[in-house]
Image (tube, rainbow, N blue to C red):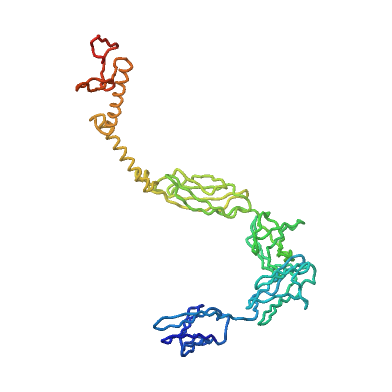
Amino acid sequence: MISCTAEGEPLPEISWRRASDGQTFADGDKSQDGRVEVRGRHGKSMLTISGVRLSDWGRFDCEALSRIGGHQKSMFLDIEYAPKFQTNQTIFYSWEGNPVNISCDVRSNPPATMLWRRDRFTISSQGTSNIRIHSAEGRSLLEVTPVSDRDFGRYNCTARNNIGARYQEFILAQADVPSNPYSVRLTAVSQRLATVSFMKPDSHGGVPISYYIINIKDTSAQDWRTVRSHGVQTTVVLASLEPNTTYEVRVAAVNGKGQGEFSHTESFQTLAIREPSPPTVHGQRGVGKAYRLGLIKQDDGGMPIVEYIVKYKTDKEEQWMTKLVPGMNDFALLQPLQWNTRYNVEITARNVKGLSEPTFFQFLMPQKPDITDSLFSGLGLGAVVGLGLAALLLLLVLVDVGCFFFRHCGLLMFISRKLCSKKTTTSGKSKELEEGKAAYLKLPLKEENGKEVLKPDLIEIKVHSDNMHTKQDDSKA
């Protein structure tokens, strides 16, 4: 029960707000489950919680409000309770020399103290030579490294606070290797391959299975060859087998403790070498008068495919044309072919044992494309637009060249005149200077007695002669 009292004139109305979910309670209100109820009169309000739960923990706000104003106070409901264990796993497995951590997780308020017991004896927090205790708030970790059978058994974790005490029992069991797999079966047996499948063991020995090992050997041999599974998959493909040979196979599971017992031994015989199976064929249109046939190898009969024999002819012809394709290839290219013609094809595979049954295939060559299709069939929209712009630019250049030669106008003529005029001006002056036929003087003008007189460095005079002759009374210029 939480009370809240408020004074004022006029007397304020009191309401409560639960911070955890924001729900508000006024006088006479109840929660949906009926556990929370508010009663009040004359400036005093009581919030009552029946059957207190841990979810009721948190802040409650009391607000007094009148037409003059309001005021708020907050109160915190702290719920104390005895320890509660949060650990679900109570059985742990290990073996001699393998450390294992037994975790005891507790929730309580106030915090609980925790200790471990074994056979009614308390385990010191300092631990022993093979037992250590690691403590943190709400958790105590017991690390046990078994050195003998005596270290396996029951361990008790006790948690205590001022509300109460609780204990939980943990069992440290001795792990074992897995039991043997069963129902071993051989499927998809060929000359070189076989698939073995099996059921997982009934017992993993307390430790998860890591992988399986498959032993296989020729019945006439003494030593087993070991194949390891990918993880815990119960289907394994056996490769590199010999044709027409009897084999024995057995399976065992492996966990952290070690390898379990083998299953019953099963025998199987690989197939004898024979002719290959017919190949699978699919068509892919080629370029121009060519056609590409895709070849998919099937069962090779126990020996590599030496070659594919491809025969083809038109509907109207009687004679077959033959093309030999190496066995390592995955396609055959037929060319040159006729436009708008249907072809019949027979493909057989050959190994050292002989020929497969033929695979039949038909295809129709397209009609002969026109020049437009030939030029632009392989080009995208961007390439076509680029070619159009290039053609337009070439046309403009040809028109400008024609104007240059026949009408002496255009962009090319304008550029030519600009370059030639600059070259002529510069070369003329340089030639005169080199021949010594031009001399330049700059004479200034100045005023003397109201008249302008010559002054050097302002007036330029050009003299067309190698020598200058002057008289005594001539101008200095």
The single residue placed furthest to the left in the displayed view is 450
**Looking at the rendering, which quadrant does residue 180 occupy?**
bottom right
| Residue sitting nearer the eye, 25 or 170 | 25
Instruction: Residue 21: give x, y in percent of width and height.
Output: 50, 78
- Left or right relative to 176: residue 426: left
Indicate left or right for 434 with 64 as reference.
left
Split into 4 quadrants, where in the image is the C terminus? top left
Looking at the rendered structure, the number of numbered marks drawn on it comes to 0
Q: Is residue 209 left or right of residue 277?
A: right
Residue 438: x, y in percent?
29, 16
Residue placed most toward the observer, 19 or 34 = 19
Is 462 placed above or below 404 here? above
In depth, the one of 439 and 294 nearer the eye is 439
* Residue 64 image offset from top left, x and y in percent: 45, 83
In the rendered image, the vertical position of residue 18 relative to residue 384, given as above or below: below
Q: Give coordinates of residue 183: x percent, y percent.
A: 68, 68
Tell whether 367 sits left or right of 127.
left
Q: Nearer the viewer, residue 123 or 15?
A: 15
Q: Residue furthest bottom?
A: 41
Location of the N terminus by quadrant is bottom right
Q: Is residue 183 above or below residue 274?
A: below
Specify the quadrant of the image occupied by residue 413. top left
Residue at 73% in and 72% down: 172
